[in-house]
Structures are given as C-alpha cells and as structure tokens.
Image (cartoon, helix red, strand yellow):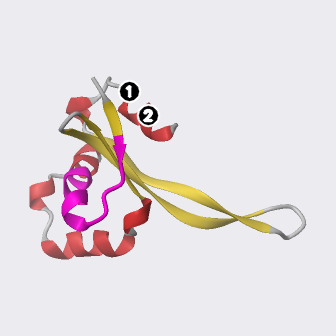
Amino acid sequence: MSLEILTPTDDDQWRPFDNAIATSFGSVPEERDEEQLARSRALLPHDFRIGIVDGEEVLGGCVSYEIEMSLPGGASVPVAALSSVGVDATKTGRGALRTMMI
C-alpha cells in the first residue's frame, strides 16, 4: 500500500476524485448531469483540490477554500476551510482520510 496525495490540475484529472467524493456522500456519479458537474467545477478552484490514490486506485479527495478568520482586535488572517472531504466507502480502512488531513 502506497498512499499518494495528488493535486489534479484540470477537470479530466479531477473527475475520478469527484466521483469518489460523491459516492462517499451517497450520490451515484453516473446520475449527475452536465449542469451539476459544471456547477461543481465552477465552485472548486483547481489549486485547492486534493485527491488520494493507492497506486492507481482512486480512494477519495477533498477541497479547500481560502477564507478570512477574524482575530481579537479586529485583525483577520487567511485560513483554509475544508469541504467535500470523502473516501469511497468501499475503500476505507487504509488511512486515506488521515493522510489527507496531515
């Protein structure tokens, strides 16, 4: 087992990870239409997508957004907000989720 983190750079590379995430949330990827896929692509910038594989097998992925966090005194700093974190339910128990979060 060799888990590897990838950062897909285009929609074709992202699609298998998006499907794994959708599956982890109970969706059937084949049933999503092009409008739903286009909306997903528009919301998720390429440089904030993370995928995880075991060899050639796609396990899951997540996305993060840069947001501002308010601090005492009125200051704010940029932080990452994670969303859509998922690992295909048939591929759990390999440490994929933990590896993505480290």
Please name whichever residue, 73 or 13, is drawn nearer the observer in this view of the structure.
Answer: 13
Q: Quadrant of residue 53?
A: top left
The prevailing secondary structure element of the residues shown in magenta is: helix
Could you say which disc has been placed on residue 14 in the image?
Answer: none
Residue 91, placed above or below residue 79 = above
Residue at x-position 90% and y-position 66%: 73
Label 1: how many Cα within 10 Å (few below 14, some 14–19, many 20+) = few
Image spot of residue 51 (x, y percent): 33, 48
Q: In which quarter of the image is residue 12?
A: bottom left
Question: Seen in the image, is 24 located left or right of residue 47?
Answer: left
Question: Seen in the image, is 74 located left or right of residue 91?
Answer: right
Residue at x-position 37% and y-position 42%: 5
Magenta highlight on residue 59:
no
Image spot of residue 77 (x, y percent): 73, 64
Kindly check if marks 2 and 1 are in contact, taking CB atoms under 8 A apart as contact. yes
Quadrant holding the N terminus: top left
The residue to which callout 2 is attached is: 99
Magenta-highlighted residues:
5-19
Image spot of residue 42 (x, y percent): 33, 76
The residue to which callout 1 is attached is: 95
Q: How far apart are marks 2 and 1 (CA)?
A: 6 Å
Badge 1 element: loop
